[in-house]
Image: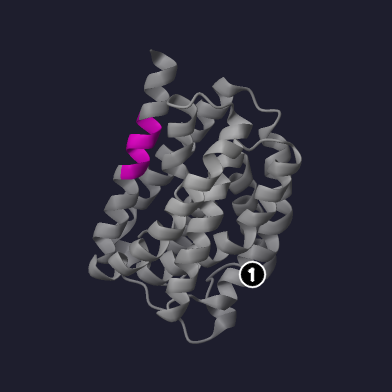
Amino acid sequence: MVGLGGGFVLVPILRLVFGLAPAEAAGTSLALVVANSASGAFTYFLQKRVHVKIGLLLAAGGLPGSILGAVAAAHIPAVAFDWIFAGLLLTVTADIYANRKRRLAGRVADDGANLIKGMSYRVALAVGLGVGFVSSLFGVGGGVIVIPSLLYLSDLPAHVIAATSHFTIFLTSPVGLVTHAAQHDIALGDVVPLVLGGLIGGPVGARLSRLVSGPRLLALVCVAMVIAAGALILHRLV
C-alpha cells in the first residue's frame, strides 16, 4: 500500500519472535521483499503509476549497494543491528511527519531531466547506492530510503512515489537476496510461506492504495515504523 517491501515489519518479527540472527533475518526477509515488490510493481505497471526513469536511475546505484549491504549484515553485532535499525525507522518517521504537507503538494514534472530537483544524476546514483546497501543490510527492500528521498527531492505525488519505490525495490532486492543466499543467510523453511504471502499481498496492497488518500498513506508509514522500532527498543531495554 505504501511502496515498502514489507521488511521493516517482518525483520523485527524474525528477530524477536523467531530468534534469527541479523544476517539471517535480513536474508530471509528479502525473500518476501522480492516476491512482494515483484507482484506489487507488476500491478502498479498495469495502473501506469510507475515513473520508470527515476526507478532505473536509483536501481543503477542500488545494485552494487545491495552486494555491499549483504556482506556487511554478516559482520554486524546483533545489538548494533537492532539499535541502528530502530534509529533508522524513527528518523525516517520523524522526517516524513515533519514535512508531510509540503511533500504532498508536489506534482510530476514534465521534463525527466528535472524530476529530481537540485540533484545531479551522480547524487541520485549515490542515493541509489544507499538504497541498495540499506536494503540488503536490514532486509527491508530500501523503501525506507526511496520514499523519503523522493518525497523530499522530487515533485512526485505520494501515490507515484509508492509505485516507483516498488519498482526500484523489485530491481535491486534480488541481488541482495542472491548474495545472502551465497552466504547461507536464509532460513529456507520460512521462505516458501513468506513468498506465497508476498505474492498475494503485493497486488492486494497496490489496489487498496488507490482507495487511500496521500496523507493517510504517509500516516500508515509512520505508525508502522514507530511500532516496529518500538518493539526492537523494548526488546533491548527489557
Q: Is residue 225 magenta?
A: yes
Residue identifier under label 1? 57
Could you tell me residue 169's position as x and y percent? 56, 59
* Residue for point 59% across, 53% down: 131
Q: Is residue 154 above or below residue 15?
A: below
Could you tell me residue 29's position as x and y percent? 53, 43
Q: Secondary structure at mark 1?
A: helix
User: Predominant secondary structure in magenta?
Assistant: helix
- Dot 1 alpha-carbon crowd within 10 angstroms: few under 14, some 14 to 19, many 20 or more: some
- Closest to the observer: 160 or 119? 160
- Closest to the observer: 35 or 148? 35
Q: Residue furthest bottom?
A: 110
Could you tell me residue 77's position as x and y percent? 63, 22
The residues colored magenta run: 224-230
- Residue 211 falls left or right of residue 55: left
Q: Is residue 43 above or below residue 183?
A: below
- The quadrant in which residue 24 appears is top right
Quick one: quadrant of the C terminus?
top left
- Closest to the observer: 104 or 132? 132
- The quadrant in which residue 64 appears is bottom right
Q: Can residue 191 be seen at all in this image of the molecule?
A: yes
Q: Can residue 124 be seen at all in this image of the molecule?
A: no
* Residue for point 46% across, 59% down: 199
- Residue 233 falls left or right of residue 83: left
- Residue 17 falls left or right of residue 178: left
User: Three-letter amino acid code at disc 1?
Assistant: Leu
